[in-house]
Structure formats: C-alpha cells, structure tokens
Amino acid sequence: MSEYRPPSFGMIPPVVKNILIINVLCYLATITPIGVFILNFGAAHYFDAKGFGIWQFITYGFLHSTRDIFHIVFNMLAVFMFGSQLENFLGSKKFFSYYMITIIGAMVLQEVINAYQVHQLCGSFIPYSQNIVFTDGYALEKVRSIYSTQTVGASGAVFGLLLAFGMLFPESWIFVYFFPIKAKYLVFIYGAIELYMAVQNNPNDNVAHYAHLGGMLFGFILLKVWKIRKPGSYY
C-alpha cells in the first residue's frame, strides 16, 4: 500500500515554500488597517464591476478571507501536502506554471459563469455600463450580488493540485478525517461535490464552486497538453 506522507518543513521545495510565505504575508497585510484597500485592489471582481483590474486574475489567489482563518489554513495545508510531491515530480518551473495557470483558469471559468448568469437575467453582459433598467426584483438582486462579490483564495489552484495528484499518484492513500482513501477516488468525490454545489446556485452559498471546477479543468488540460503521466507509465 502506498501511503502519502508530506515532507517536513525544512524539505519543502522552493516554489511551494514561497507560495506559503507569500500567502501568509498577504494574509497578515489584510488584517492591518490597510487591509480593506488591499482586498479591494487584489480580490477578483466581475469584469464590468467598478474596481475590476486584469491583475486580479492572479492576485485574488494570494488573498484569503479575514473572517475565517481556516480559509487560508486549509488551503495552505493542501498546497503543502500535494504541492510538495508535485513540485518534486514536475520540477519547479513546470510546477510554478501549473500553479499559476490553474489560478488564472479558475477565475476565467468563474467569470464566464458569472457573465452567463448576468446575461440570462437581463439580456446583457454589462447591464450597468448600458444603464439597463430592471423590472424584475430577483434579477436586480442577483446581478447586484454578482457585481458586488469579491472573490479571494487559492482554492482554485488547490483543486488543480488535487486533480494532478489524483492523476499522477492515483493509488496513494490520503487520510481524510482519519479515514484512508485513494487519491483517485478523492478527486472524483470532491469534483462531484463541487459540481453538485455549483449547479444548486444557492444564494446563501458564498463559495466559488465554479472556480474550484475551473482549477481542476485547466489542470486536466495542462497535464494532457504536457503529456504528463504517472510515475512508471510509458508511451
């Protein structure tokens, strides 16, 4: 049985170590008096919303909720656990590219879904820029919610890492709440849960499920484009 054991902190590969450090420093910065400015500047906004910037497709992935410390704790734990072995296998340069592309890809899918929902509600992707008058109260509130939402977190990249780990080390055992499960099954379960939660479109759900799915989707595409196979596989 192959059991996954994360490395000690002193043996963390360089890219993963720097990702952890940058995220922690960014989190500490957001709990200072200038934290609101940092979040407004770096969090991802809807592309037609006031405050949107193209850089946010990257910066959002290094910011986390200041209202829930477990947001950053669990994300960084996952980066540490899965990212270390993936960086050692892929190499630092390729791992860095993979991580950054899944961050961007996660938000690309989230933005596409948001734009689709806005268009379905009012017939336009940019209703505020076109000064569209809403006659439906539900549509107005939903569009307002999309425009005002700020997305933060490394979760999209984390789901990309989980996908890669499950594809490259499918038989590895991972302990989830003290219960062992093979990596390939864990990926399937998490992916299915995220898809189910995404299509529910619960107005009280503040989780960017499509961003999680976007990280997995772009990660899958990258592994196929790069023709990366699990250890021991041959062409």
Image (tube, rainbow, N blue to C red):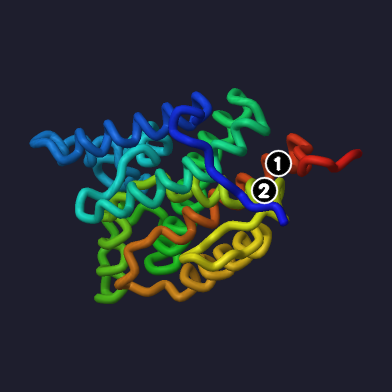
Residue 121 lies in what quarter of the image?
bottom left
In-image side of 31 versus 101 (left or right): left
Residue 63, given in percent of the width and then of the height, sits at 31, 41
Numbered disc total: 2
Determine whether the residue tagged by mark 1 lies in a helix, strand or loop.
Answer: helix
Amino acid carrying label 2: it is Phe
Residue 200 lies in what quarter of the image?
bottom left
Residue plotted at (64% across, 26% down): 91
In-image side of 235 versus 38 (left or right): right
Label 2 packing within 10 angstroms: few (<14), some (14-19), many (20+): some
In-image side of 224 versus 105 (left or right): right
Asked whether residue 128 is in view, the answer is no
Residue plotted at (53% across, 51% down): 159
- CB of mark 1 within 8 Å of CB of mark 2? yes
Which of 171 and 207 lies nearest the eye of the viewer?
171
- Circle 2 residue: 220
Label 1 packing within 10 angstroms: few (<14), some (14-19), many (20+): some
Q: From this viewpoint, which residue is outermost toward the right?
A: 235
- Circle 1 residue: 223
Residue 92 lies in what quarter of the image?
top right
Asked whether residue 69 is in view, the answer is yes
Residue plotted at (42% across, 32% down): 19
Amino acid carrying label 1: it is Leu
Q: From this viewpoint, which residue is outermost toward the left?
A: 33
Determine whether the residue tagged by mark 2 lies in a helix, strand or loop.
Answer: helix
Which of 123 and 211 lies nearest the eye of the viewer?
211
Which of 16 and 160 lies nearest the eye of the viewer?
16
Check the picture and name the quadrant holding the N terminus.
Answer: bottom right
Residue plotted at (59% across, 32% down): 87
